[in-house]
Image (spheres, grey):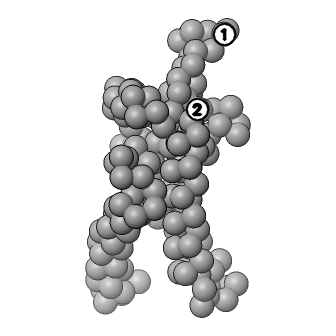
Amino acid sequence: MNKKQIDILNDYFLHTALHLLTLEEQCLRKACSKDLSIRELHVLEAVSSLRGSGRNTMAEIARYLHLSPASLTTAVNVLVKKEFVTRSYSPVDRRVIYVELSESGEEANRKYLDFVRDMIRTVGRDLDEENTDAMIASIISLTEYLEKNAEA
């Protein structure tokens, strides 16, 4: 990769991250829920993603979101008060706490996922299969880099 390509990618990474946050904020104001922060919306998505495999515990959600258990506890406490999630204890081990989406949590998450899917369809609309595969490979590499360095 040459310097010009590095500069272009650097510019796009910075601006893309900012634009994504702006779009998520717009989703919150328009479609999702005015009563949620972006972090809370991400917690709802994590609960939804992890529950299919039975991993919707506080520990797994914190790991999935790269949050400390204390930060997640604060977010979940707020979401319980706002009635977007419920909390229950494992009947086998009361140290294990499960988080479930309420009806309003399901609705907010569904709207958020619709927003994300629409964004992905728009981005991929003009890509052929080969370019789509290349983009996916690049995003996987970026994700692996971020995860590796987040743990360091």
Which quarter of the image is occupied by the C terminus?
top left
The residue to which callout 2 is attached is 100
**Residue neighbourhood size for the residue with mark 2, other residues' Cα within 10 Å, grouped as few (<14), some (14–19), many (≥20):** some
Three-letter code, disc 2: Glu
Query: Which numbered disc covers residue 91?
Result: 1
Three-letter code, disc 1: Pro
Residue 15: x and y in percent read: 30, 75
The structure residue drawn at horizontal position 40% and vertical position 64%, both measured from the top left corner, is 30
Which quarter of the image is occupied by the N terminus?
bottom left
Q: Nearer the viewer, residue 29 or 131?
A: 29
The structure residue drawn at horizontal position 51% and vertical position 50%, both measured from the top left corner, is 108
**Residue neighbourhood size for the residue with mark 1, other residues' Cα within 10 Å, grouped as few (<14), some (14–19), many (≥20):** few
Q: Nearer the viewer, residue 64 or 99?
A: 99
Query: Which numbered disc covers residue 118?
Result: none
Position of 38 with respect to 134 (left or right) is left
Residue 123 visible to an observer of this rendering: yes
Position of 129 with respect to 135 (left or right) is right
